[in-house]
Amino acid sequence: MNSSEKLSKNIVDIPTQIGVDNFGILNESPTSENYQNSMTTCIALLADDGKSVVVATDKMLSINVAANTPYELDDDRHKKIIELNSRIVVLIAGNIETATAIFSQLKIDESLQPLAATEAVRKAYAQYVLDAKEKNILQPIALTWERYFKEQSSMNQAIVNDIHKKLQDYNCGVEVVVTGQDSTTNLCHIFLVGLSGVSFDKTDAGFATIGSGWSIATFTILQSGFNKSKKLTEIEALAKKVMQEASHAPGVGKLTESLVLPKTKPKE
């Protein structure tokens, strides 16, 4: 195994982080720059003491066109709710082409539980980011991961600092929520994989929000007096209200798609 392969394995194998804050808010510091390619809203809300979870997304898509400019449209042909197996789904906020590249090779066994599914998603995400950094930052200056780590000690410090900053600042513009039912306990869980590629457990908080409408969605949830012990019908009504409010955020579509787990029939 060469050094670049070792680096890939070490980074991808970083374990899931259990980082829950008091309100279920993303454990990163969202900025307009971070969210410029996540022009959407996705939410997941637990109900019935965690026995059910309601998920919802808008239908606005972001795709790369000329000069890597995001282009948004309301579209029924592509889904932001992707089923990993009959009990677990992924919600996607960000560039649809990047998300497709990340998850196209991901295979989740029916027996896999939410935590293990999240780790599989996180590893696929981390590997994509690692490859993208090499392709977009290192290769244009005739470097690979292996050459960079081998030769950086002899390189001009200003150049090393510039490369390091670009590597740190790189963001692929995709964040995801993984949620679903654990078949061993019949309880649902929520995990978030943020722009940093680190995953957070949002189960205790009872909800997660991602995309450019995350702040409006979070405020609406907290203002409602949300509690994951509430009945499913109440949480479904809340999810509808949250999506309506979040639609006022830039780049968030008016059309929505929702789903209740462990049920599998989507509700428009």
Image: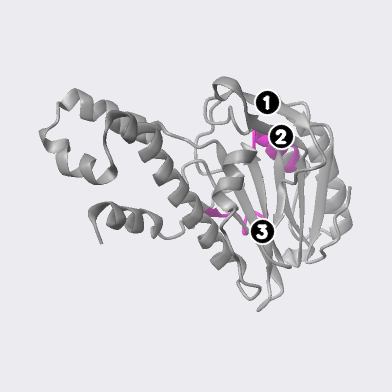
SS of the residue under disc 1:
strand
Say what amino acid the circle numbered 2 marks: Leu
Say what amino acid the circle numbered 1 marks: Tyr
Q: Point out the stretch of residues depicted in magenta.
A: 200-221
**Quarter of the figure that contains the N terminus:** bottom left
Q: Which residue is under mark 2?
A: 61
Separation of marks 1 and 2 at Cα, in angstroms: 7 Å
Separation of marks 3 and 2 at Cα, in angstroms: 21 Å
Q: Position of residue 240 (x, y in %)?
A: 85, 43
Residue occupying image coordinates x 69% and y 35%: 40
Is residue 73 covered in magenta?
no
Q: Is residue 192 visible?
A: no
Residues at discs 1 and 2 in contact (Cβ within 8 Å):
yes
* Labelled disc at residue 179: 3
For marks 3 and 2, give the one nearer the viewer.
Answer: 2
Q: Which residue is under mark 1?
A: 71
Labels 1 and 2: the sequence-earlier one? 2
Q: Position of residue 5 (x, y in %)?
A: 30, 56
* Labelled disc at residue 173: none
Residue occupying image coordinates x 58% and y 27%: 36
Residue occupying image coordinates x 85% and y 59%: 232
Separation of marks 1 and 3 at Cα, in angstroms: 28 Å
Q: Position of residue 236 (x, y in %)?
A: 85, 51
